[in-house]
Amino acid sequence: MREAGVDVVAKVDGLMDGLTADLERLAAIPSVAFPGFPAGPVEQAYDLLVGLLRDAGVAHVERIDLPDTAPVIYAEIPPPHPEAPVVLLYSHYDVQPPGDESLWLSPPFEPTAVAGGLRARGIADDKANVIAHLGMLRAFEGRPPVGVKIVFEGQEEYGSPFDGYPPTDPERFACDAMVIADLGNLRPGTPTLTTGLRGAAEVVVEVRTLAEPRHSGEFGGAAPDALLVLLKALATLHDVHGDVAVEGLRRQDWEGAGYTEEEFRELAGVVDGVPLIGSGSLGERLWSGPAITVIGLDAPSVDHAASAVVPYARAKLNLRFHPRQDPHEAQALLLEHLRPLQPFGVPLTVTAGDTGPGYEARTDGPAYRAAREALAAAWGSQTSYVATGGSIPLVNGLAQAAPDAEVLLFGAQDASCNLHAPNERVLFSELRNTVVAMCGFVERYASGFHRGGATGEAGPEAQVRPSGGSGASRASGTSGASG
């Protein structure tokens, strides 16, 4: 099996100035696809990437327009021969909103030099990974040793109807392996494959006890306080150690790599002297076990509090669960825990919200082995594997469209890149090594591949047309919801 050639590594090093310049151009575009943000910058980013793909030698580029979402770039490079494998490359070109810009050390859409890299909103999540895909294509001058299908999504961060589209058009997304580049390394300098994604579900808990607030001096002590009822119910979700106490939620030992406690405390910004919650390894708590977080609470604020018994309170819960647990089962277990509760005799109103499945990748196939070797060669150290508590809804859609394809999750991000936070940044070393790893992966995979493959059944309902850049119209409709 041929090592990633020195010529390819040298080629990537020679391409880095151009790749970095294109990353700056892309990161300067405020391509936020959330409601209330203009669509123009998203279209501008789309047009830039179409041009960069064509410049990289990709002749077949299409635009997929689904209702209620930003355009998807779809492109193909045919296999160099009939027995060569086909690899699907995925990233997204939209970004999170910048948030409170006063917390940024430089304007979020003005790419700014930092030690060893660049700072800007979306530069790590996920524009560096888009550029990494382009870097591999440039290194092979548009003629890689595998067939390539490219999917650059334009509304991943907000949530998109595209998540469910691939299974309706399986022939388009049929492939032997896919590289989902929407994450990265455990830490800078540690090549990492992500093998599991926790699933997610939401539940809302409401309590109403009085028609309206009543004076706490005159009525407190007998009038039922809705906030106290809600807090007593929420307190049952965890045991004395902080472990989730809902029966039936799957939890198992974590055998892969993980953070040290010191690393995690720094990454999470845990205040000095405050302990971490839960028991067992960090990997078990973060990736192979459940977590329940109160992500929203409707109750009187401290600054505007009146001396009154609270008549109404509501909380929104976010449940993360084992990659192999069914999302509806996991959500039902949480509902079944909460619904019978009647703190102080007061019933709860418990409502199911959205769910999203987890994913666990195969790790015994030729693509996984090729990727593990390629990452180790690019970084010069052994490849680690981790899971993530976040979710990438499209992974399941693509996996359903190509059920026999191996799914590989790696990229140019790292745990300290501040994705979704102020002062997001990417390191040039991680970007360069990701491009080298991509090149090494397709070389190894092509040389060791034996034709297998799978297809599916066709389906509707998108507008698909050759992409000529600017001026193409978007379909209209309602907005998607994030997972």
Image (tube, rainbow, N blue to C red):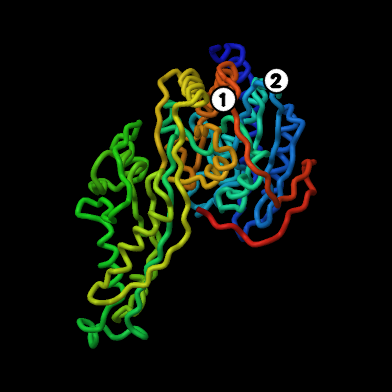
Please give the label number shown on residue 206: none
Q: Amino acid at mark 2?
A: His
Q: Amino acid at mark 1?
A: Met
Dividing the picture into quadrants, the one containing residue 480 is bottom right
Front disc: 1 or 2: 2
Residue under the image location 48 percent in, 26 percent down: 365
Q: Secondary structure at mark 2?
A: loop
Q: Secondary structure at mark 1?
A: helix
| Count of marks overlaid on the render | 2
Q: Is residue 431 above or below residue 318?
A: above
Mark 1 packing: few (<14 Cα in 10 Å), some, or many (20+)? Answer: many
Nearer to me, 239 or 49: 239
At which x and y percent is residue 42? 67, 48
Residue topped by disc 2: 81
Q: Is residue 301 above or below residue 198?
A: below
Nearer to me, 398 or 70: 398
At which x and y percent is residue 116? 50, 29
At which x and y percent is residue 115? 48, 31
Residue under the image location 39 percent in, 55 percent down: 329
Q: Is residue 353 above or below residue 148?
A: below
170 lies left or right of 425: right
Whether residue 107 is visible, yes or no, is no
Whether residue 95 is visible, yes or no, is yes
Residue topped by disc 1: 438
Nearer to me, 88 or 276: 88
337 lies left or right of 433: left
Nearer to me, 365 or 145: 365
Q: CB under 8 Å between callouts 1 and 2?
A: no
